[in-house]
Image: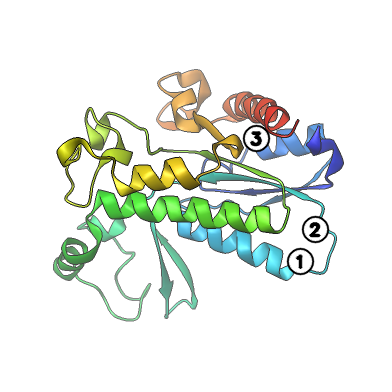
Amino acid sequence: MILDEKKNLLVLGCSFTVSEHKTFGEFISEKYNMNLHNLGIEGGSNFYIQKKLIQFFAKNKNTSLFDDTFVIIGWSHPQRRLYWNNNKKDWFNDTNHINMKETDRFKEPFIHKTWTYKDRQNFATNFLDSSFAENSHYMEHIISTQSFMELNKIPYIMFNSLWDMFSKGGMYQTHMAIDIDENESNPPNFGQPTINRVVWENLVNENKFFEKVFVDMIGDDKSLWYSEDDSHPNEKAHKLWSDKLVKFIGDAYV
């Protein structure tokens, strides 16, 4: 098992990777006697996940961490975005607050100058409100990240915490997100595959991508919920998820 061969485990993701209780990263690192580096953050975006991954290995280029780490990435929802906050001098993860009328995230003193709801809506209408574009960004995060890992011979797996390109229902009704085209048609016109589907099928390494979705495993089973009103994973859910990931890792790295 490759996890026996590595001393460090790096975990990146959103609130599905962090908790006040034991997480899947802790279960796996303890089982294989690894040092855990959990860079997950509540509300983390895919932009943030990728950025923290690059920074981690850049900072540790000349240390044993570069060659002695296994990486697990739990991708978040592609609708989340990342901005640089000139006031806080730090990155700001936006969990779609840009479309919320009542929020302090775009008001002074959190940012330099208040960004009104009307102006935010105009910006979103002009540049953001596109499922096709969100899906495209999401796949570019996956492909560029897997390319970095494979180029540097860093072992890894990925999975989706909240959502995936093959989701049905919800905002995508009866069709898959991957089949939304640039005209927001779903299914696309003329029966041709969308460029997003072409990119996924030709460039994503599915051998390292666990097809199950963390939130789907939890579902409506409240015994796996953090609390009666909070469907985030509890310790039991994290243990079940860690077992599934270990099985997948064993199969992926024979």
20 displayed left or right of 33? left
Q: Is residue 133 visible?
A: yes
Q: Residue at x 55, y 63 (%)?
A: 51
Are the residues tagged 1 and 3 within 8 Å (C-beta)? no
Marks 3 and 2 sit apart, C-alpha to C-alpha, by 20 Å
Compare marks 2 and 1 and give the one earlier in the sequence: 1
Q: Which residue is mark 3?
A: 24
- Relative height, residue 225 to residue 70 (above, below): above
* Percent coordinates x, y for residue 116 in the rendering: 19, 70
* Percent coordinates x, y for residue 115 in the rendering: 24, 73
Amino acid under disc 3: Phe
Q: Nearer the viewer, mark 3 or mark 2?
A: 2
- Image quarter in which the N terminus is found: top right
- Looking at the image, which is closer to me, 150 or 5? 150
Residue 66 picture quarter: bottom right
Q: Nearer the viewer, mark 1 or mark 3?
A: 1
Say which element carries label 3. helix
Say which element carries label 1. loop
User: On residue 60, which mark appears?
Assistant: 1
Say which element carries label 2. loop
Amino acid under disc 2: Leu
Compare marks 1 and 3 and give the one earlier in the sequence: 3
- Image quarter in which the C terminus is found: top right
Residue 192 picture quarter: top left
- Relative height, residue 140 to residue 238 (above, below): below
Q: Residue at x 38, y 50 (%)?
A: 78
- Local packing at callout 2 (Cα closer than 10 Å; few below 14, some 14-19, many 20+) is some
Are the residues tagged 2 and 1 within 8 Å (C-beta)? yes
Amino acid under disc 1: Asn
